[in-house]
Image (cartoon, grey):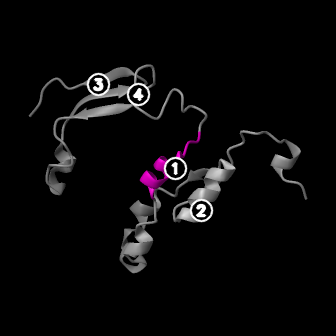
Amino acid sequence: MRGTHDAFPRSDARPKITHCTLINDDLIRRMKALDAVPAMFTTYAYYNTDKFPFYGEPLMKRSMAYRTMLDAGAYASFEESIKGSISTGKLADFVILADDPHTVSPDRIKDVDIVRTVVGGTTMYTATKRR
């Protein structure tokens, strides 16, 4: 049985690994060599937090490791020349917050006001007043 890549080969296929949530250094190396794209199971963290204590810290450090993927050069949409960083000439989706969520108490993060929202480099919302 022939696979799709065999039938329609292309050098920049970027095969996707779906639910690529638990990684190790060897997997990162192999994905990079294949130019494979990780697609992590992001909602798992929301719906299954009750399971995390059973996994243990060593396993959790390798789960949903976005920083590791970014450092390895993970990309998916062939848009890395126009997206992926806030720099001149690139599209930008971001918010400006009234407070730094890293410095406010965790129970107050939900109350941090949005000052400005930018989508595709265009301001879509500006707060009229702040608390």
Of the numbered discs 1 and 3, the one sitting upstream in the chain is 1
Residue under pointer 1: 72
Q: Which mark is residue 27?
A: 2
Residue under pointer 3: 125
Q: Which mark is residue 92?
A: 4
The N terminus: image quadrant:
bottom right
Depicted 80 relative to depicted 52: above or below:
above
Q: What amino acid does circle 1 point to? A: Ala
Real-space Cα separation, disc 1 to disc 2, in angstroms: 11 Å
Q: Nearer the viewer, mark 2 or mark 4?
A: 2
Real-space Cα separation, disc 1 to disc 4, in angstroms: 22 Å
Real-space Cα separation, disc 1 to disc 3, in angstroms: 34 Å
Position of 60 with respect to 95 (left or right) is right
Of the numbered discs 3 and 2, the one sitting upstream in the chain is 2
Question: In the rendering, at what x and y percent does residue 106 appear?
Answer: 18, 56
Real-space Cα separation, disc 3 to disc 2, in angstroms: 41 Å
Q: What amino acid does circle 2 point to? A: Leu
Mark 4: few/some/many CA within 10 Å (<14, 14-19, 20+): some
* Residue 19 in view: no
Range covered by the magenta-colored residues? 65-76
Kindly check if marks 3 and 4 are in contact, taking CB atoms under 8 A apart as contact. Answer: no
Q: Nearer the viewer, mark 3 or mark 4?
A: 4
